[in-house]
Structure formats: C-alpha cells, structure tokens
Amino acid sequence: MEENNVHVVATGGLSPQYHLVKNVIESAKRVNRNIVAVVGGGIISADPETAMESLECVDFGVIGEGEVTMCELARALENGGDFSKVDGLIFKDCSCFKKTNPRKDIESIGTISWLDYEGFDIEKYLEIPLAHFAGINKNRMICMLGSRSCPYHCTFCCHTLGKNIACDHLMIFFCRT
C-alpha cells in the first residue's frame, strides 16, 4: 500500500463476513490512518447505520449496487466534490450518519464490464483457494457475476438487492482455468 501510494481501500461482503471486512479495513488504517475506507455489499445495505457503527473506522458505506456509486465516489474524492450528491452512500457527518438518495438499480447487468485483472498478479490470485465458496475449496478459480438478487421470497430475508432477478449472462459462479 505504501509502495503504491494507495489512498482508498474498498471491500465488502455479507454479515457473516463481518470479521473479515473489519480486519481488511483495520489493517489498511494501521498502514495509513488517513486512508479512505469504503465498504459495500449486503453487510452495509441490510442495515447501514448499524454496520457503520460496528465497522467504526469505515469512512463510506455503499448502499445497494456499487458499480456506479464507487465511480462517482472516486471522482468526488479526487476532485474534492460534495459526497452528499453521490447517490447510494452513507457516511459520518459530524456526529451522525448521513444517507444520500438511493441509487437506482442497474436494469441490465449486461451493461457492467467484466473485471479487469490487468495490474494484478493473476497467477498468484488463482492459487489462493476461495474459502468454502459454494462448498468448493479449490485453487485456480475466479468468482464471476452471473445474476443478482434471489428467486426465492423467504420471509426472513431482507433482499438487500431487491426482489427483481437480474440475469443477463450465463450463470457462471466460478471458472476453472
């Protein structure tokens, strides 16, 4: 992080991954206490205020889908912009949390670019096992977006991405290379 002059660290996950998410953010803050920490995913979207309180050193939470929000947040950080104009955020403003307007859902996930791994040592990444992903614990796998949301309507689930199923790509959850 120091060698590459990193200014922003972004991560996310679901509530069961709380300790992993917190560890990433706290580790980044130990390296540079001024680094901007951003967290997204279901852990924030399900209950933004509670998550932000629990992950106390997080600077910004992304509520809902984050692709557009992260780009706008990056622009605002780079240009000293007004964060309150970036839809889909929660952040601390004085002593309370401020939530911006909800981000409109991406209607077609086919409009989202595939991940660009250039600049990452992809061979090293492929050797790290995805810990119990879908009951699979193997090397040389990459998660890929195949759909969003869930087709079921369980009464105990808060559906952080809504109840509309978005599926524009072949359902591929991992890729053996």
Image: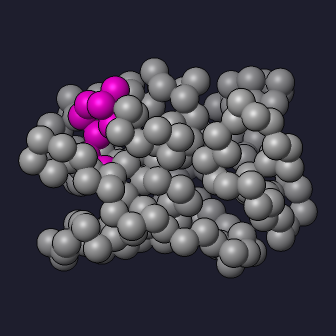
Residue 54 inside the magenta-drawn segment: yes
Q: Is residue 135 left or right of residue 103?
A: right
| Point 38% across, 27% down: residue | 22
Answer above or below: position of 112 versus 144.
Answer: below
Q: Residue furthest front?
A: 155
The front one of 45 and 28 is: 45
| Above or below, comparing residue 94 to residue 119 in the picture | above
Q: Answer whether residue 23 is magenta in the image.
A: no
Residue at image location 48% in from the left, 26% down from the top: 18
Quick check: 38 above or below 167? above
**Which residue is at the far left?**
94
Residue 83 point in image, percent of width and height = 24, 66
| Farthest-out residue, right | 170
Q: Is residue 5 visible?
A: yes
In terms of depth relative to the viewer, which is nearer, 174 or 117?
A: 174
Q: How many numbered circles are shown? A: 0
- At horizontal 62% and vertical 63% (from top left) the residue drawn is 115
Image coordinates of residue 161 in percent, x first then y, are 64, 53
Left of 137 or right of it: where is 157? left
Task: Tell me if residue 144 can be seen.
Answer: no
Query: On the rendered structure, is 123 left or right of 177?
Result: left
Q: Position of residue 134 (x, y in %)?
A: 81, 31
Q: Nearer the viewer, residue 153 or 138?
A: 153
Query: Residue 124, position in %: x, y?
Result: 60, 40
Question: Which image quarter is the N terminus in?
Answer: top left
Residues in magenta?
Answer: 52-60
